[in-house]
Image (cartoon, helix red, strand yellow):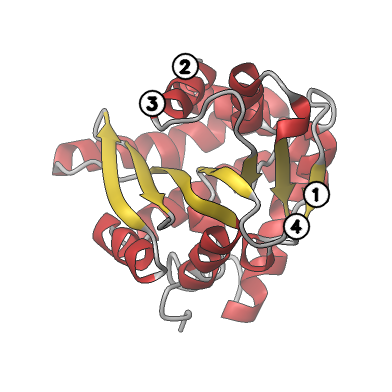
Amino acid sequence: MGSPTAPHPVLKKYYESESERRPFVRALFDDAAEHYDWVCALGSFGSGQRYRRSVLVRSGLCPGMRLLDVATGTGLVARAATRILRDPGALIGLDPSGGMLREARRTLSIPLVQGTVEELPFANNHFDFLSMGYALRHMADLGVAFGECLRVLKPGGRVLILEITLPSSRLGQRVFRVYFEKVLPRIARISTGSAKAELLMKYYWDTIAGCVPPDMILGVLKSSGFIDVERRVLGGLLSEYLGRKPV
């Protein structure tokens, strides 16, 4: 059994127990890091960076703010944020995977820190804005993670969590499943020649299919202390979870 606020149950085809979740995920991303941007481009049909920049602006990110990008990976959200903030010193990226951070350093000149969202190595009340792009499913515990996000934000600071959500219709779910479970992993393997990239895409689907429902995510954000919590949905697939730290 997972913890009460684990994002999805233990996936025994990949690891046997909750204690093995974090080491498995870290190794998986380490091994597939060099192919990650290419695979993401396939999954987003080339629209990913335009969307990331747009949602950051719509959510209130603007020059003069200090941003923490949690689970920054290869820096996809961070790259979009640098175009808004226009100051590399105003943004820090954090990720548990050394492999992903090595890839991020190829395109970013911002500070990059290895660490987990459940144990953020930053002082209280330090950031104006905290972002997380498509990594909620890879946390160990939503409650602990959201509590840490709240801690490092300044009073009035904002959190934005981007995530993929199953379509509401049965037909949409079937189409989505075929693409993410069958088509995308095969394309990843053929285009990169990497079995690790293929495995990452298969794992992506299983975490999407097993993820806790949006109402639970909203509930944990609220119980962690965030206010003005809401969920916006784009195209029936992309969820934008927002919240604010009380003043």
Marked residue nearer the N-terminal end (3 or 4): 4
Relative to the observer, which residue lies in front, 62 or 72? 62
Q: How many marks?
A: 4
Q: Which mark is residue 27?
A: 4
Q: Are marks 4 and 2 in contact (CB under 8 Å)?
A: no
Quadrant of res 121 = bottom right
Q: Residues within 10 Å of mark 2 (few under 14, many from 20)?
A: few
Q: Earlier in the sequence, mark 2 or mark 3?
A: 2
- Chain-order first, disc 4 or disc 1: 4
Which three-letter amino acid code belongs to the residue tagged 1?
Val
Disc 3 residue crowd, few under 14, some 14–19, many 20+, Cα 10 Å: few
Q: Which mark is residue 113?
A: 1
User: Quick one: label 4 or label 2, which is nearer the N terminus?
Assistant: 4
Numbered circle sitting on residue 47: 2
Q: Nearer the viewer, mark 4 or mark 2?
A: 2
- Secondary element under disc 2, as helix, strand or loop, is loop
Mark toward the viewer: 3 or 4:
3
Residue type (three-letter) at the residue carrying disc 2 = Ser
Q: Residue 244: give x, y in percent of width and height.
A: 40, 50
In the rendered view, does 81 fall on the left or right side of 98? left
